[in-house]
Amino acid sequence: MSLERFIKNHKNEFDDEKMPNLASLDFEARIKKELHYSNQPKRLRFLRSFSIAASILLLVTLGYVFNQNRVEDLKIRDNLVLALGENQTNSTRLEAIYEIEDRYDNQEEDEKILEAFFKILKGDSNSNSKIAVIDALLNFPDNPSVRNNIIEALANEKEPLVQLKLIKSVTLLREQRAKASLQQIIENNESLPLVKGNASASLAMLNQ
Amino acid sequence: MQVYLMYKDMLYNVSLRIIKNKHDAQDTVHDAFIKAFQNISKLEDDLNLGAWLKRIVINCSLDFLRKKKKLGWLQYSVEIQDNEEEADDFEDMTLKVEDVKKAIEGLKDKYRIIIVLYLIEDYTHKEIAEQLGLNESTVRNQYRRGKHLLKQQLKNKLVV
């Protein structure tokens, strides 16, 4: 018998390899996935691809707009912080404080703005500026550094109008840590009677 | 899955004979099944499902080799006149399928693929030429040379 004929006659015997079972299992999972996808009408697939592309574009655009707005906001914030600076006139500072109060109403506190406020509160600024800053700070009664700075200011402040504002503030905040400073104001001979009276009333309220 | 279970082993053997690597052959058979299922509407005669699947697997296997640049020999396949027809002098008892299979596997790709397609997969020389992009006469000569080498290998084995 010729070699050709031998091979042709026995060709079924050449098929002696078996596909491994593991490979069959892989295929079962793959076919479910692939055919499920390919059975969808072309139009549906196009719409699906289109909607994915449109969503991505929308997200990118929103991201860009958001980023632009954020950049713009930061620029405004930095300008306002600059307007609170020591070298600015009292009226510029006051204007900036009121602008900040309006702009950031019901928003989370901004660390950079708070730092500028604290600087005004502790510095030799005009009383009107300090009083406006205290009003602005009272918008964040839960912020620990706001509370700490108000208590600290009460201990160091010598200006009667600002002292009165600070006494009212610690009473409003029901800040027990302010008791020592209040006592100090009461005992200080240099304190105005009006200030002493307010400090006594506040201390009595805190002791209740 | 029934079609898969019915034909998977047959197609795996077809692909393995061409690709020679088990994992690649498994992947190729799976690719071929997916391709077939996606194009099932193009099957004109249901009775020829097996043959149709076999064609797809052969195409996929050759495509796989093309992608892996293992069919580079095609561009160097030139027509060499070799008209000597050798006499087949094997007797029934001397040949074993296992030996022939090993001898085919030992051939260079350029002979092995043509031998496999012609003798086992029942392709004509013309079909092989179309499939590989060669002249029919080149395929015939390549086949003849391959067969000659195959015989030599088998004879050497028998002598040893």
Image (cartoon, rainbow, N blue to C red):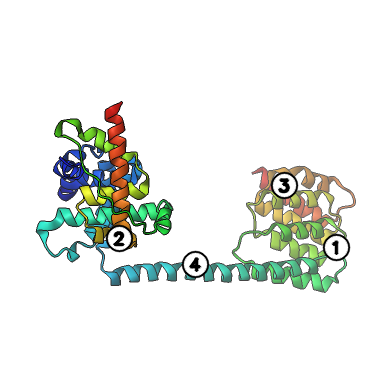
Q: Which residue is mark 1?
A: A125
Nearer-N-terminus badge (3/4)? 4
Q: Quadrant of residue A132?
A: bottom right
Q: Which residue is mark 4?
A: A59
| Residue at image location 40% in from the left, 53% down from the top | B71
Asked if labels 3 and 2 touch by Cβ distance under 8 angstroms, the answer is: no
Which circle, 4 or 2, is nearer the viewer? 2
The residues tagged by marks 2 and 3 sit, at their Cα atoms, a distance apart of 113 Å
Nearer-N-terminus badge (1/4)? 4
Element under disc 1:
loop
Nearer-N-terminus badge (1/3)? 1
Going by the picture, which residue comes out furthest to the right?
A: A190
Q: Is residue B81 visible?
A: yes
Asked if labels 2 and 4 touch by Cβ distance under 8 angstroms, the answer is: no
The residues tagged by marks 3 and 4 sit, at their Cα atoms, a distance apart of 56 Å
Q: How far across and how far down the image is residue B68, in percent?
A: 42, 51
The subunit carrying tag 3 is A
Which circle, 2 or 3, is nearer the viewer? 2
- Mark 2 residue type: Ser
Element under disc 2:
helix
- Mark 1 residue type: Ser
Asked if labels 1 and 2 touch by Cβ distance under 8 angstroms, the answer is: no
Is residue A74 toward the left or the right of residue B57 in the image?
Answer: right
